[in-house]
Image (tube, helix red, strand yellow):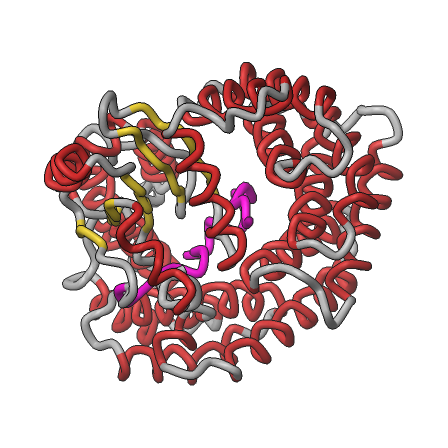
Amino acid sequence: MREFVFPDPSLTSRAGQFVWLAINTEEEKNAPFLLKFPGEAVPTFAVLDPKDESVVLRLVGSMSVPQLHAFLDNARIAVAGGGGSGRQADETLRAADQHYGRRKYAEAAEAYRLALGQAPAQWPPYARAVEALLYSYQQTSAHDRCVELAQRVLKRLAGTPSELTAATSGLDCALALKADAPDKAQRVAAREADVRRIVADPKVAGAADDVSGAYGSLLEARRAAKDEAGARRTAEQWAAYLDTAAARAQTPGQRTVFDSHRLTAYLAMGQPERAIPMLEASERDFPQDYNPPARLAAAYQGMNEWDKALAAADRALPLVYGPRKLRVLEVKAEVLKSKGDLAGGRRTLQEAVAFADALPPGQRSESRVAALRKKLESWTAPSPPPS
Amino acid sequence: MHRLTRASLTAVLLATFAPLLGAANLPFVEDDYARALSEARSRKLPLFIEAWAPW
């Protein structure tokens, strides 16, 4: 967002309409904020009424410039006490947004559903209400409803950025249906076809990370179908899309924005070596950024180049901070184990457990601590041969 | 709006297209909620918050 959206000149006029706060969720000093305003993903955007610190509008995920303008307009209306339109749908939407702001997704889903039912034709907030309802369904594991909604709204959203978001949500939800759900395979196939049709359009409306996310879901769909060749082809299409987007970048900062997804796509293709030149360039351009060496460690791990992976992890570790350090330590531990140094791997994993355990409330994740402990316990030293 | 719900992808150092540099047009307060809240109250302006990660 800061590379492609916030610098947009059209936002300059917005500077005086809000006080702007950026919270790096990896910084320990922000843990109290995260405890007060927990979130499930980054980026998350919220607008608070400073009088009572209530969240009047919240959105999980990135936005295009027009979407951000709309978000800001809606937030200002909400802080002012609603649209004043007198329309029932607008009042219900306001209540839904308040539930969503408090992460009360079951209540939010019910209110968004009601608002959409009350809405007149050509209701301006239609697309964002649909997106919020889909997300609320996902958060409450109402996958069946999510699939049905995604299917129903696509025609009306055609040609808008919300079309791809809705289609991708529908596919994610279809994949999340229980294995014995009626017609699961057919429903996944139908939703996958939606996403494939939309991303195949060279004029696809949507931010690059929405398109990239859609390819990620398509990859999951092929994997779920145990279609190895199809998964590889999808990963190749994903990588081609990202390579083209990265080639259009006008600054090194814009180029590195695509590094993580490109690495994921290359790994899925079975060609992690393709990530090496771009990550080396990023490490040269941003020597204080832990991401390039951390990603190089993962790429070299995928290539079974253990010594290079360890060297990259050791370059990342002095730079990395916050919860992300756990992943770097975990990669290092896995590499040591793969290299045959089980004791070294266990020591590194113990370091990760201790670090995870010591993270402050707001950053500490019980499930992450438990997963690391479980992994450590499974890495038992081989029994000595009987004497 | 990317939803980031695929756990299997996030396992591979996956990030959303996260920022590296500041936004020149918008005067962001960095990592200081108390200061931003105080400023919003004194200027009677809503507080916009971006929660992000550098990965």
Quarter of the image containing the N terminus of chain A?
bottom left
Q: Name the residue: 33% across, 30% down.
A: A38
Q: Name the residue: 67% across, 61% down.
A: A205
Query: Quick one: A27 or B14, which is closer to the camera?
Result: A27
Quarter of the image containing the C terminus of chain A?
top left
Question: Magenta segment, principal secondary structure?
Answer: loop
| Residue A284 higher or lower than A330, as above or below | below
Splitting the image into 4 quarters, where does residue A76 fall? Answer: top left
| Residue A165 higher or lower than A183, as above or below | below
Q: Name the residue: 34% across, 62% down.
A: A12
Splitting the image into 4 quarters, where does residue A122 fall? Answer: top right
Lateral position of residue A209 relative to residue B26, left or right: right
Q: Is residue A346 visible?
A: no
Magenta stretch contains residue B17: yes
Query: Quick one: A49 or A378, which is closer to the camera?
Result: A49
Query: Quick one: A124 or A358, which is closer to the camera?
Result: A124
Q: Is residue A252 visible?
A: yes
Residue A80 on image: x %, y % = 38, 29
| Residue A92 higher or lower than A22, as above or below | above
Query: Quick one: A249 or A192, which is closer to the camera?
Result: A249
Magenta stretch contains residue A79: no
Tally of marks: 0
Residue B4 on image: x %, y % = 52, 45
> Magenta segment, which residues?
B1-22
Q: Name the residue: 77% across, 33% down.
A: A121
